[in-house]
Image: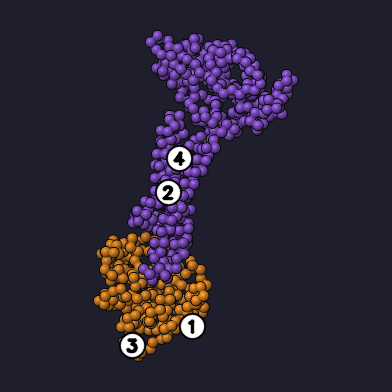
Amino acid sequence: MFFYYLRLARISILRHWGLSLLMVTAIALGIGAAMTTVTVNYLMSADPIPSKSHALHTIQLDNWDESNPFKEGLEPPPFLTYRDAKNLLSAKKAQRQTMHTAAKAVIEPLAEEDLPLYVTVRANTADFFTMFETPFVYGGPWQKEVDDNNDLVVVLSEKINERLFAGENSVGKSIKINGDLYKVVGVLANWQPKPRFYHVDKVKAFDDSEDIFLPFTAITRKKINFDDNSYCWGPTTDNWQDYLNSECAWVHFWVEFNSPAEKQQYRDFLNGYVEEQRLYGRFKRPNDNRINTLEQWFKAREVINKDNNMLMAMAFLFLGVCLLNTVGLLLAKFLGKSPEIGLRQALGASKSTLFYQYMVESACIGVMGGLLGLLFTYLGLAGIEVLYGEKMKALVTLDAQLVIFAILLSVAATVIAGLYPTWRACNVAPANQLKSQ
Amino acid sequence: MLSMNNLCKVFQSADIQTHALREVNLSVNEGDFLSVTGPSGSGKTTFLNIAGLLENHSSGEFLLDGENVGALKDSARSRLRNQKIGFIFQGFNLIPDLNLYDNVDVPLRYRGFNARERKQRIHSQLERVGLASRMKHLPAQLSGGQQQRVAIARALATDPRFLLADEPTGNLDSEMAQGVMSLLEEINQQGTTIIMVTHDTELAQRASRSIQIKDGRVSEVPPLMKRVIA
């Protein structure tokens, strides 16, 4: 009977095409609005490194002022001090560990006629590339020894390699950054994780990855300029060495574990480390050493912020309004079919049979609404891209899962919207309808 | 075959009770052609609706082929309607969106016949009423008489044992009415029991039995009386 009902639905929809079009459009508008926000939220909360996300963790230590807690004591600072990061890195207590921060620099032209190139920099230690599975087209990460012996090496992004070397293999060549010559050891393939998980916050979570990658020592030796958030308490001076030794938290610190046992061991190590530091008059606040999973980190850093959630709630409210309109239109349509429903009852259709028939029709309208809704979603996402620019591009793409979800949402919403009109229509007294026809 | 014993139907709205049928006692036998006459509002249509299981009676007993239908659920009543009863209405009640083929197909679908069986029955019934060549037409493209013949084809498609006709010629001119009446007589002669509500005393006279309903009470009209009424 299903295919018979499908045929009846097609006939009915075409016969009353104006009313059907109104319903399909109402649903499509709701679905379009809802799916636009769902798509953005879905892609924002997507796992950017599924093969590793279970193993990667960030570290937080509460080194803050005893009498004036960071974020009212709810959370320790998001980064570590340089001292702590360096100590933890040297201890090598995790499978892998890296410290990194954002910086900026100028690549000086090799030829006189060229212009200098202002670039974004990630200053990091060697494990960064292995931990975060950065793909290389040429060369590879620098050796761990580089982090200690201050070699001037650089990993280029594909974009910068294209710009400087026309996409050729540049490994072994040198470029001049802020007056020093750096040897290229690797060139990354286009690597744009979204969210940019290794450096997330409310504002920068969806920025592109950096143009070049330099050893962390380039920052500590002040070869390049630090360009990241820094949280400080207590007295500070303009002296760079004092800053490195201060309680200012600015270093992103990540570790990789292979098992829960390793994580527990690391937690014990951190507790021991903090206790040891207390002997030097530091860490006066109660223990709040955190080892965050990627999911916990995104939540803490508000990668999906409250505004987005509010926007999604409003979009679903709009879908609700559209569905209420659809309920009204379906009610009008199905009650208009009361004589036919009465007749079908006289000819042997039970109420449940009729209910099934009209729910199939509702579902068909839902499928059409979903398909048109996908078009509206596409337009909505294109609008967001136009509004917010290139960096949102990765967040405004519909994948197969979202397409299926949109259609299922549309069908489910329309079937729910069709329940009451169908129930009302199927409960008309057939005798009255037959006489009045 | 159809038996009503002390059957009553009361419509209740707010504080008002309307007795549509009062203590109806009636038996209809296989092969009967029963006409039902009476003034407007006397309860004829209510009687037909109850006989066709479209409405429940308020009290009394109603047996259809020996089965007490009073306690049956919606699905069982629907099945009985589909298997045993055919309906013909004054307003034809064809589904305007469906062509003749699909209109006749409706009860066959609910019966669960396979495609070949349905096709054979639809062709056979439309041929019987002389409209086989127009099966792809929509009802609106036919005259009133032709529409009623399609309705008769639809009613007969499932081989019902009863045919319930509510003013089947009420919307037709006299020539078309005669044609439809002749068709009903032919169907009756082939063994189908017919109960026909009509205002037309001339048509009522052509039935093998007649009852009259007045103020909800049913009385049999003897053959002699039928001639007098005529």
Q: Tell me the quarter of the picture where residue A62 sits.
A: top right
Pick the front one: A191 or A231: A231
Residue marked by disc 2: A27
Residue A376 rendering spot, x and y as whole percentages: 40, 42
A400 horizontally vs B185: left or right: right
Camera-nearest label, 4 or 1: 4
Whether marks 1 and 3 lie on the same chain? yes
Q: Are marks 4 and 1 in contact (CB under 8 Å)?
A: no
Figure colour of chain B: orange
Give me the C-alpha separation between circle 4 and circle 2. 14 Å
Figure colour of chain A: purple
B179 horizontally vs A376: left or right: left
Give me the C-alpha separation between circle 4 and circle 3. 76 Å
In the image, residue A98 sits, relative to residue A317, either above or below, namely above
Give me the C-alpha separation between circle 4 and circle 1. 66 Å
Camera-nearest label, 4 or 3: 4
Q: Tell me the quarter of the picture where residue A71 sits.
A: top right
**Image mark for residue A36:** 4
Query: Which residue is at 41% across, 61% downward?
Result: A335
Residue marked by disc 1: B23
